[in-house]
Amino acid sequence: MNALIIEDEKLVALELMASIAEVDPGIKIIGTVGSVKTALRWFAENAEPDVIFADVQLADGVSFTVFDRFKLSCPIIFTTAYNEYAIQAFKVNGIDYLLKPVDWDELRHAINKARTLTKAQGNVAVDIQKLMLALNVPVKPVFKEHFLGNTRNSWVPVKVAEVSLFTRDQLNFMVTNTGERYILDYDSLDEIETLLNPDQFYRTNRHTIVNLEAVQSVKGMSNLKLIVKLKAPNHLIDIEISRDKAPSFKKWLEK
């Protein structure tokens, strides 16, 4: 069985993955998403899994928003610290409601129930995106609007529009339009890039993603590379773009 995990706490998601592997090694985790917006995008771009393990309270809302948008046929096992959503959970294909920390016996029972239901229904995964395209329903991409930056053991919410660039230097950072620099709790710039609107942000190189609104000027070099100058107070940061990427970057600037 293929499974998707919806959980906004990375450590909790890793613990759940480990528990599932111990209880039922036959389950393959095909993805983990940590917010309502990334979950909406995931279901717009991927086939429905055989089973979903979902937290209720996410950083940007409740997971019921996802299940209201996409009418899924697969069973959903809710894993949450809150017991007040139980009734609502069973209205959206919820087959079990496990309170954190998840008990292995309860998890095993829930998985067995999901397997039984999947076999009985002959559940066929539906590619939501292809279906919507076939019906000429436009699929609107969902992009992140805020990031949480870490500074001095405090979390600071920052609007994406206020970020000049994302950069990697051992850790991942975002630099705001006013020059603040915050650590981001993401594994890679690749992951961050998927959350951003490509019309607004461009991956200039392996280490940097830049905001169009932060670009002050672009200087051409004799080796056909480009040097991007940012607006103050980040004007001392120079971003190099390779000769190979220069044409696509110019096209992006002209959008």
Image: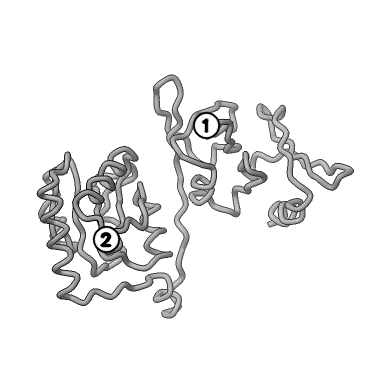
Residue 164: percent from the left, percent from the top?
A: 60, 37
In depth, the one of 203 and 27 nearer the eye is 27
Task: Measure how far apart labels 1 and 2 are at the Cα level.
Answer: 34 Å
Residue 231 left/right relative to 130: right
Identified by mark 1, the residue type is Leu
Is 135 above or below relative to 35? Answer: below
In depth, the one of 247 and 142 nearer the eye is 247
The image quadrant where one finds the C terminus is: bottom right
Identified by mark 2, the residue type is Phe
Residue 67: percent from the left, percent from the top?
A: 27, 61
Residue 8 left/right relative to 164: left
Residue 191: percent from the left, percent from the top?
A: 49, 47
Q: Colour scheme used in the picture?
A: one colour
Residue 1 left/right relative to 192: left
Residue 57: percent from the left, percent from the top?
A: 25, 44
> For the image shown, how many numbered marks are present on the structure?
2
In depth, the one of 85 and 127 nearer the eye is 127
Dividing the picture into quadrants, the one containing residue 81 is top left
Q: Tag 2, which secondary structure?
A: helix
Circle 2 sits on which residue?
67
Q: Residue furthest right?
A: 222
Dividing the picture into quadrants, the one containing residue 148 is top left
Q: Tag 1, which secondary structure?
A: strand
Density class for disc 2 (Cα within 10 Å; few <14, some 14-19, many ≥20) is: some
Which tag is nearer the camera, tag 1 or tag 2?
1
**Which residue occupies 44% across, 28% down?**
150
Badge 1 vs badge 2, beta-carbon distance below 8 Å: no
Circle 1 sits on which residue?
171
Q: Which residue lies furthest to the top in this view?
A: 152
Q: Which residue lies furthest to the bottom in this view?
A: 134
